[in-house]
Amino acid sequence: MTKKFVFYLNLFCFFTFFKVLAADEGMPQLNPEFWISQIFWLTLIFGSLYLLLSKLILPKISNNLEIRKSKIAENIEAAEMQREKSEQKLKDYEKIINNAKNEAKIIFNQAREKILIDINNKKDSLEKEIDEEIKKVEEEITNLKNKSSEKINKIAIEASSDLIKQVIGADVNNSNISAIVEDISKKNEGKGYVN
């Protein structure tokens, strides 16, 4: 009640003050005989403005604000869901990459082991082939050694008999020459000479 009283008291003081000022009849707005019409039009205009703002414009503005607020909330929620999906996809991607790396390491190690086994098998088979070839060559050399001494003795006997025939001019018995050549070759074998 005191607020209403203070309001009406202020209103009364206001009208009284303006009545004193309007006594000079300077401004028509301050002339008390126009006050009622001014109050009427003031109430009508501000009342219509109030009704227009409160019933048409402000509800549309508040509705737009609510729509924007809900749209922003939906966008934030959608963005949060997208962020969670992208984080999950990133985790899945990293998991796939790690699995692929591990599989690549396993495949590489298996291939490496297989290659090493193949290399060792080929090395062993090559060494066996080389050993067999060396044995064959050694056997051939031994056979050649054995056969060469006989051939050398035979060639020496023929060459000696031809030489004696040319020097003396007569045929010599080959058995005597072969005995001498064999005796010399046995002496050379004891000294380590190769025939």
Image (cartoon, rainbow, N blue to C red):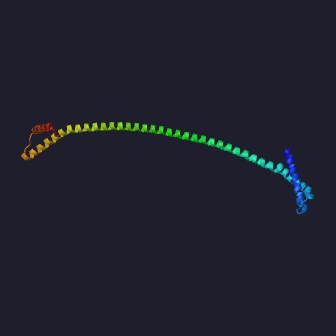
For the residue pair 14 and 173, the one nearer the viewer reads as 14
Q: Which residue is drawn at 87% across and 47% down?
A: 5
Whether residue 134 is visible to the viewer of this picture, yes or no, is yes
**Residue 116 is drawn in which quadrant?**
top left
Q: Where is residue 105 in the image (x, y as percent from the top left)?
A: 48, 39
Q: Is residue 195 visible in this depiction of the protein?
A: no
The vertical placement of 36 against 71, above or below, is below
Quadrant location of the N terminus? top right
Residue 151, image quadrant: top left
Residue at screen point 92% across, 58% down = 34
Residue closest to the far right:
33
**What residue is shown at x 19% (from left), y 40% (from top)?**
148
Residue in front for this viewpoint, 189 or 43: 43
**Where the C terminus falls, by quadrant?**
top left
Q: Nearer the viewer, residue 11 or 147?
A: 11
Percent across and percent down for residue 92 are: 58, 40
> What x and y, as percent, mark residue 101?
50, 40
108 vs 92, left or right, is left
Q: Is residue 32 above or below residue 66?
A: below
Q: How many labels does the image show?
A: 0
Spot occupied by residue 135 in the image (x, y as percentages of width and height): 28, 36
Identity of the residue drawn at 61% across and 43% down: 86
- The residue lying toward the viewer, choosing from 135 and 113, is 113
